[in-house]
Image: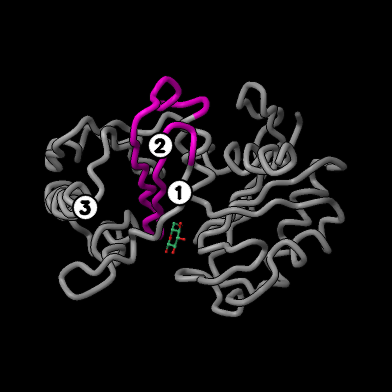
Amino acid sequence: MKVLGIDIGGSAIKGAPVDTGTGRLLADRFKIETPLLLSPTEMADAAGMIAAHFRWRGPVGIGFPGVIHGSTILTSANLDKKFIGCDGIKLFSKVIGRPVALTNDAAAAGLAEMRFGVGRNFGGKALLLTLGTGVGSVLFFRGALFPCELGHLPMDGRDAEKRVAASVKNRKNLSWKEWGHRLGCYIDILEKILWPELIVIGGGVSAKHAKFFKYVKPRVKMVPAEFLNEAGIVGAALWAERERRG
Ligand code: BGC
């Protein structure tokens, strides 16, 4: 199936048509930087611009950085708070003019990694974390996915993502060692609670895994994601396909 995958992030919205049978992009991705917080209507317009760029007439999958129940967006930690309570499917499909499926951004990234990326032959319990503006999380077990909000676990008196997101490393100018140790403490907590058999680290920073994995020291195998910046786009498309098949 050919699906337009759109990934909404803290600093950009990007999309590309995806072949859901191979996980490959069918065209170069189109990205719109969003240095300022966009309102829901502005974000929907940006998603519409992506669909228009590809003259898209088919199904659309969107990954959003918040909790999604059904079609409702329940949280928006790093985007405009006006998203909270929005019917996301209505919001985006009205502007795009095509059927839209909506899921959490990390769940989307995880879908791509487990189907076509680093987790493709793994059937056990896997935890995928995305380290970007915030921290996204999703658990997989034998084909089932469970979107989580582990970035908001309390750590040192604040949300863990305010300590370990990649954006925090940049903002606070932390060395790889300092940040790697923080991440190690965080992952230690997660391992004690969840006991994953495999940990996948995604987000743009995973490309630099050689610089910080050595400080993390998890109990189980930890691997960088393979898709890097495309995971969210590919996974959003896979989610739309999954929703269509029911
Ligand atoms: C949000 C999650 C999202 C993650 C990564 C967190 O702040 O609460 O829903 O997956 O950021 O974007």
- Residue 64: in magenta span: no
- List the residue tagged with mark 2: 141
**Quadrant placement of the N terminus:** top right
Determine the residue positioned at 75% across, 67% down: 91
Q: Give the amino acid at mark 3.
A: Ile
- List the residue tagged with mark 3: 193
Cα distance between the residues tagged 2 and 1: 8 Å
Q: Give the amino acid at mark 2.
A: Phe
Q: Which residues are magenta?
A: 115-144
Q: Quadrant location of residue 97?
A: bottom right
Task: List x then y, in percent, for residue 127.
Answer: 34, 42
Q: Are marks 2 and 1 in contact (CB under 8 Å)?
A: yes
Of label 1 and label 3, which has the lower sequence position?
1
Task: List x then y, in percent, for residue 38.
Answer: 62, 71
**The residue tagged with tag 1: helix, strand or loop?**
strand
Please state the quadrant of the image where ligand 1 appears.
bottom left
Determine the residue positioned at 84% across, 51% down: 98
Specify whether tag 3 is near ligand 1 (CB below 8 Å). Answer: no
The tally of labels here is 3
Cα distance between the residues tagged 2 and 3: 15 Å
Cα distance between the residues tagged 1 and 3: 15 Å
Determine the residue positioned at 51% across, 63% down: 66
